[in-house]
C-alpha cells in the first residue's frame, strides 16, 4: 500500500514539474517569432526582454515553438533567446533588491544596469556615441537571406548546436 | 478505498501547491517591496543583460583611444557577414546582438567585447583577400564571444564579489551608495577585461580554442576552413615581431597555422560552386577592395 502511495506522489510531482517546464522567458532585448524553425523564416512579430512564453514544441534542435504573453502571437523562437528561469521586470524599485534572486527567478535590471552604466560613463567621462551607433547596425532579414543564398552558404538551421 | 482517499488528499495538496505557484512572481516582488527577504541565493554567472552592459563599457573604453573607419559599405558588409556567421555558432543570440565596427589603423588588431561588440582593424582585414578569409577573422572573434572569454578575464576574486553584490542589488537611484558600490566593482571588472584585450592577451590555449571553434563555424556555414590557414600565413608575413596589437596579445600566427593545419589534416574539403565563389569574391571586392 505504501508503495502505491509513494508512486502516486511521484507521478503527481512529475506532473507538476512538467507544468513548470512549459514556461520560458525571453533573455534578449528583442527576438522575432517566426513561421517556421528557421532563421530565414518569416517574422510574425516580436517578443521583448522578460516576456513569458508558453512552450508548445521543443522537438526541433535549436528552436522552441511558443505562444506569446498575449496568447495570440504563436510561432518559433531561437532557443538561444530563451531561458527556463523566469525574469521579473522590476528594476524601478530600490526595495525589490532582496527579492526575486532565487534559482527560479531572475530580476531584470539587477546589478550592472543602466544606472550603473550612467554612473560609470560620468565617472570616466566616457563617450558612448559609437557604442550606441554600432548597437543600431542591424541586419535585415532580406539582407541576411540574400547574403546566404547568393554566397552559396549552407542553410543556417541546424548550424547552431 | 484508503488508497483512493490518499490519492484525493494528494490531489488536493497538489492543487494547493499549484495555486501557490500561480500566485508566483507578482507576490515575490511585492514581498521584496515590503522589505522582506525572499531569497538571497548567490548569482553564479553574469546574466546576458549584465554581459551586455559590460561589453558596452569595454567597447567604449577601447573606442576612447581609437578612431573608427566610417565606411558605410565596408561596415554594412562586415555586419551582414558577422550576423550570418553567428547563425552557425552555438550562440546565435546575445542580449543586444552582434555588431561590428572597423578601426582606422594599420595595426593588426581586433577586439571582441562581451555580448558581441566586435572591433576589427583595417590592418587585420588586409590579411584577408577573399570573403572566406574575412569570415575566418570574424569567426575567430565571434568564438571569443560565444566562449565568454572576455567575462572570464575578470579576476576570480572580483567575480565572487560581483556575484554576491549582483544577487542582492537592483540599483536605480543615480549617485546612491549602492550605485556607487556596484559602479566600483563594474569599473574594476571592465579594467580587467580591457587590460587583457589590449596588453596581456588571452592565454594561448584560449586563442587556440577560438581558432578551433572558428573552423567549426566556417565549415557549418560552407566557408572553406583552409582560408583560415591562408589568412594566418598572410598575417605572418605582415606582423611585426615585438610590435603592438596581435603581435603582443596573440600566439605567433605560424604556430596558430600549424595547429589549424593539424585539425584540417584528414578532414573533408569544403567545395564552393563557381557561381557562389564568384558572388562572394565580387561582393568582397566591392565592400573591402579599398580596405
Image (spheres, coloured by chain):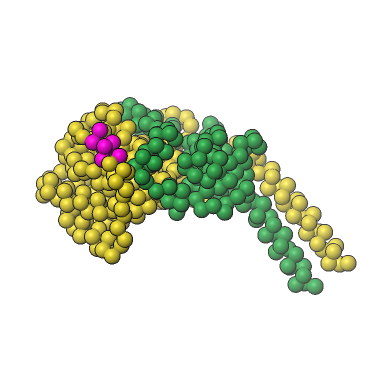
Of B277 and B213, nearer the camera is B277
State which quadrant residue A59 falls in.
Answer: bottom right
Span shown in magenta: B279-286
Q: Which chain is green?
A: A
Residue A42 place in picture, x, y as percent: 52, 37
Locate residue B262: give its quadrant. bottom left
Q: Is residue A60 left or right of residue A151?
A: right
Residue A158 in view in this figure:
yes
- Name, please, the residue furthest toward the right: B1
Q: Nearer the viewer, residue B25 or B214?
A: B214
Q: Of B44 and B198, which appears nearest the observer?
A: B198
Picture layout, residue B205 above or below residue B37 = below
Magenta stretch secondary structure, dominant = helix
**Which quarter of the figure is the N terminus of chain A placed in?**
bottom right
Residue B11: percent from the left, percent from the top? Answer: 78, 56
Q: Which residue is nearer to you in this view: B148 or B187?
A: B148
Q: In the rendering, at what x and y percent does residue B117 appear?
A: 34, 39
- Please tell me which residue is depicted at 28% across the width and 36% down the height of the picture: B283
Asked whether residue A51 is drawn in magenta, I would say no
User: What is the quadrant of residue B129 in the picture?
Assistant: top left
Q: Which chain is yellow?
A: B
Amino acid at each position: 500500500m505504501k508503495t502505491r502511495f509513494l508512486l502516486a506522489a511521484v507521478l503527481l510531482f512529475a506532473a507538476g514539474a512538467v507544468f513548470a517546464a512549459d514556461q520560458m522567458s525571453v533573455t534578449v532585448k528583442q527576438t522575432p517569432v517566426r513561421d517556421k524553425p528557421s532563421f530565414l523564416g518569416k517574422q510574425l512579430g516580436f517578443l521583448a526582454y522578460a516576456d513569458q512564453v508558453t512552450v508548445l514544441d521543443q522537438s526541433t534542435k535549436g528552436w522552441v515553438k511558443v505562444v506569446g504573453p498575449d496568447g495570440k502571437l504563436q510561432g518559433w523562437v531561437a532557443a538561444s533567446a530563451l531561458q527556463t528561469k523566469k525574469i521579473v521586470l522590476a528594476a524601478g524599485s530600490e526595495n525589490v533588491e532582496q527579492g526575486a534572486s532565487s534559482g527560479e527567478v531572475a530580476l531584470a535590471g539587477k546589478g550592472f544596469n543602466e544606472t550603473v552604466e550612467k554612473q560609470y560613463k560620468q565617472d570616466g567621462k566616457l563617450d558612448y556615441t559609437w557604442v550606441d551607433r554600432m548597437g543600431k547596425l542591424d541586419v535585415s532579414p532580406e539582407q541576411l537571406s540574400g547574403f546566404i543564398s547568393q554566397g552559396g552558404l549552407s542553410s543556417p538551421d541546424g548550424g547552431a548546436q | 478505498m484508503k488508497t483512493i482517499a490518499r490519492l484525493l488528499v494528494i490531489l488536493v495538496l497538489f492543487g494547493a501547491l499549484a495555486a501557490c505557484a500561480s500566485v508566483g512572481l507578482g507576490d515575490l516582488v511585492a514581498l521584496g517591496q515590503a522589505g522582506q527577504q525572499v531569497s538571497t541565493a548567490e548569482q553564479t554567472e553574469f546574466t546576458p543583460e549584465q554581459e551586455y552592459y559590460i561589453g558596452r563599457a569595454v567597447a567604449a573604453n577601447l573606442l576612447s583611444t581609437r578612431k573608427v573607419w566610417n565606411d558605410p559599405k565596408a561596415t554594412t558588409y562586415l555586419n551582414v557577414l558577422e550576423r550570418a556567421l553567428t547563425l552557425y555558432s552555438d550562440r546565435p543570440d546575445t542580449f543586444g546582438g552582434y555588431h561590428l565596427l572597423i578601426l582606422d589603423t594599420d595595426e593588426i588588431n581586433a577586439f571582441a567585447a562581451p555580448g558581441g561588440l566586435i572591433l576589427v582593424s583595417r590592418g587585420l582585414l588586409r590579411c584577408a583577400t577573399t570573403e572566406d578569409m574575412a569570415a575566418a577573422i570574424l569567426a575567430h572573434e565571434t568564438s571569443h564571444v560565444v566562449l565568454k572569454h572576455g567575462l572570464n578575464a575578470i579576476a576570480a576574486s572580483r567575480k565572487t564579489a560581483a556575484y554576491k553584490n549582483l544577487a542582492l542589488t537592483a540599483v536605480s537611484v543615480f549617485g546612491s551608495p549602492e550605485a556607487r558600490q556596484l559602479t566600483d566593482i563594474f569599473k574594476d571588472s571592465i579594467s580587467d577585461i580591457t587590460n587583457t584585450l589590449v596588453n596581456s592577451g588571452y592565454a594561448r590555449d584560449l586563442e587556440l580554442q577560438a581558432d578551433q571553434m572558428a573552423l567549426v563555424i566556417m565549415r557549418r556555414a560552407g566557408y572553406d576552413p583552409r582560408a583560415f590557414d591562408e589568412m594566418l600565413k598572410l598575417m605572418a608575413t605582415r606582423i611585426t615581431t615585438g610590435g603592438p596589437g596581435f603581435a603582443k596579445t596573440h600566439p605567433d600566427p605560424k604556430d596558430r597555422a600549424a595547429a589549424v593545419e593539424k585539425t584540417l589534416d584528414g578532414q573533408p574539403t569544403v567545395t564552393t560552386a563557381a557561381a557562389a565563389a564568384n558572388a562572394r569574391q565580387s561582393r568582397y571586392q566591392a565592400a573591402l577592395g579599398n580596405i
